[in-house]
Image: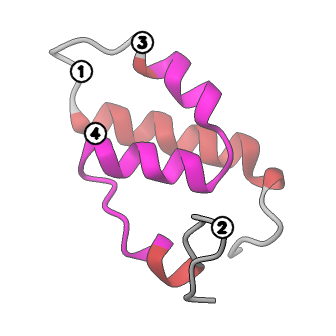
Amino acid sequence: MNSERHDVKGFREYCMLSSCTDEGLEAISKYNNFVTEWKQEVQLFNKDTSLAQKRFISFKLYAKFRKKRSYHLD
């Protein structure tokens, strides 16, 4: 649960990712297998896009693609 295999973070490391940085949001998209969709959204951001807006988009993508994960918390 907390070990890395094949450059994929375990759930413990995932829980330590910060959704308060652009790098953290990108790592979250990678972990949850919606990188392509996240990159499409990022292209729509501009310098005035707030972190709160970015986090909301990330959460919406997580909810939409959560079935891609083999497990998740309900």
Picture coordinates of residue 54, whole percent (x, y): 35, 34
Decide whether the magenta segment is chiefly helix, strand or loop.
Answer: helix
Q: Which mark is residue 69?
A: none
Name the residue that disc number 3 marks: 43
- Helix, strand or loop at label 3? It is loop
Amino acid type, mark 1: Thr
Name the quadrant of the C terminus.
bottom right
User: Does the stretch in magenta take in 22?
Assistant: yes
- Helix, strand or loop at label 1? It is loop
Compared to residue 72, the image places residue 29 above or below, namely above
Indicate which disc, 4 or 2, sits on the residue closer to the N terminus. Answer: 2
Picture coordinates of residue 70, whole percent (x, y): 83, 67
- Helix, strand or loop at label 4? It is helix
Q: In the figure, is residue 37 to the left or right of 46?
A: right
In the image, which is nearer the foreground, mark 3 or mark 4? 3
Amino acid type, mark 3: Gln
Indicate which disc, 3 or 4, sits on the residue closer to the N terminus. Answer: 3
Task: Tell me the distance, in whole angstroms, between the alpha carbons under discs 4 and 2.
Answer: 32 Å
Name the residue that disc number 4 marks: 52
Q: Quadrant of residue 7?
A: bottom right
Compared to residue 44, the image places residue 63 above or below, namely below
Name the residue that disc number 1 marks: 49
Amino acid type, mark 4: Ala
Q: Which residues are magenta?
A: 14-41
Name the residue that disc number 2 marks: 6
